[in-house]
């Protein structure tokens, strides 16, 4: 009984340490990225103001930095293909059923 209680307490302590270290590492990384984006935004604002003062051509695309993320992977592509195929099959079945129902209504 004592061994079981001791083992449970060790496992709980390890889980608490893991969760806390995971949280600390992720929160620091997130804050760092947000700080980088803020600095970039402030630089773009200053650049925009400078261009306005000098009466230069202003295009919004010059001041916005879009990062395109590609979240596709093998599994998502497979699921996308399955979904498309299922949609095609469903559409065909619905057309067939509507056609049959229309024959019933016409008679």
Image (tube, rainbow, N blue to C red):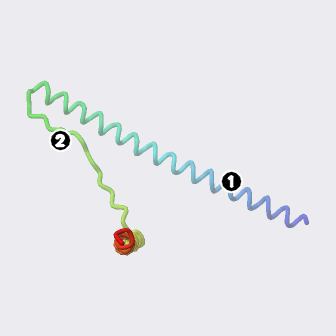
**With 47 as the anchor, is 94 left or right in this view?**
right
x, y percent for residue 102: 35, 69
Q: Who comes first in sequence, dot 1 or dot 2? A: 1
**With 47 as the anchor, is 40 left or right in this view?**
right
For the point 26% across and 35% down, the residue is 43
The residue at the far right in this view is 1
**With 7 as the anchor, is 76 left or right in this view?**
left
For the point 80% across and 64% down, the residue is 7
x, y percent for residue 98: 37, 69
For the point 40% across and 42% down, the residue is 34
Write down the residue under mark 2. 62
Name the mark nearer the viewer: 1 or 2. 2
Q: Quadrant of residue 68?
A: bottom left
Is residue 50 something one can see in this rendering? yes
**With 42 as the anchor, is 5 left or right in this view?**
right
Nearer to us in this view, 37 or 100: 100
Give the vertical position of 31 relative to 82 (above or below): above
Secondary structure of the residue carrying numbered label 1: helix
Disc sitting over residue 106 in the figure: none
Secondary structure of the residue carrying numbered label 2: helix
Separation of disc 1 and disc 2 at Cα?
Answer: 47 Å
Which quarter of the figure is the C terminus placed in? bottom left
x, y percent for residue 32: 43, 44
Write down the residue under mark 1. 16
């Amino acid at each position: 009984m004592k061994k079981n209680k001791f083992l449970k307490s060790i496992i709980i302590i390890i889980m608490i340490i893991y969760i806390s270290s995971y949280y600390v590492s992720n929160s620091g990384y997130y804050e760092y990225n947000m700080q980088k984006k803020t600095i970039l935004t402030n630089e773009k604002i200053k650049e925009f103001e400078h261009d306005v003062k000098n009466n230069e051509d202003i295009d919004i695309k010059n001041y916005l930095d879009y990062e395109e993320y590609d979240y596709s992977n093998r599994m998502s592509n497979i699921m996308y293909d399955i979904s498309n195929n299922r949609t095609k099959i469903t559409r065909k079945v619905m057309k067939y059923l509507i056609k049959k129902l229309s024959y019933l209504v016409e008679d």
